[in-house]
Image (cartoon, helix red, strand yellow):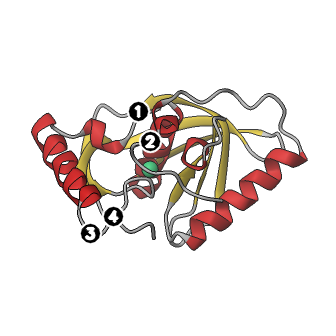
Amino acid sequence: MKVITLGNELLRQKAAAVKDINGEIKKIAEEMIDTLHRQKGVGLAGPQIGLMKRIFVIHIEGDEPRIFINPSITATSQETIKYEEGCLSIPGVWANVVRPRSVRIQAWNEKGRPFTMETEGILARVILHEYDHLEGVLFIDRLPPQKRERILAKLDKIAVGEGAPGTG
Ligand code: NI
């Protein structure tokens, strides 16, 4: 699977519900996890591979790979935390983003079983980042405007210069 990057309009569109959790979506989820491992990322959402479906996969260090299909964020903490984020679709860019410290999410797994998870720390952070992808939102959208502008200006310069941002 190829990960699409900033500038591709698909990253700005809202993904549609997965209608049927069947063998096909399970296979897609497994391929997404393989892609995530190859790209050395921690999370990958459908729109990032041009699949406009509500699915994302997460694999953080010390945890097992996790698959979320048709997720809903059912609660977030009032308390927020600043944490550095990057995105496979915006290679080479890292920035501190403020988000809720903890999250409760309801979703279905690849076997079609619903589950609810309440978590904080890095997992909560990655869940919120990946969920945003399903809504066409990128982490740079959550930065203060001046900081976002600086990043976009820098990316423009790279794009017209010699080396485009790495795709690793
Ligand atoms: Ni991302």
Q: Which residue is mark 2?
A: 128
Please state the horizontal and vertical placement of residue 151, each as a whole percent of the image: 19, 50
Q: CA distance from mark 2 to mark 4?
A: 28 Å
Q: Which residue is mark 3?
A: 162
Q: Dots 3 and 2: beta carbons under 8 Å? A: no
Determine whether the residue tagged by mark 3 lies in a helix, strand or loop.
loop
Please state the horizontal and vertical placement of residue 98, each as a whole percent of the image: 25, 43
Q: Earlier in the sequence, mark 3 or mark 2?
A: 2
Q: Earlier in the sequence, mark 1 or mark 4?
A: 1
In this rendering, which labeled residue sits more in front, label 2 or label 4? 4
Q: Give the residue type at disc 1.
A: Thr
Q: Give the residue type at disc 3.
A: Glu
Any mark on residue 164, and which? 4
In this rendering, which labeled residue sits more in front, label 3 or label 1? 3
Point 35% across, 57% down: residue: 86
Residue at the far right in the pictured view = 23
Picture quadrant where residue 164 is located: bottom left
- Which one is nearer the viewer's eye here, 113 or 167? 167
Q: Dots 2 and 1: beta carbons under 8 Å? A: yes
Q: Which residue is mark 1?
A: 76
Please state the horizontal and vertical placement of residue 16, each as a whole percent of the image: 65, 27
Report whether 100 appears left or right of 25: left
Q: Give the residue type at disc 2.
A: Leu
Q: Dots 2 and 4: beta carbons under 8 Å? A: no
How would you rate the neighbour count of disc 2 (Cα within 10 Å): few for under 14, some for 14-19, many for 20 or more?
many
Q: Earlier in the sequence, mark 2 or mark 1?
A: 1
Q: CA distance from mark 3 to mark 2?
A: 34 Å
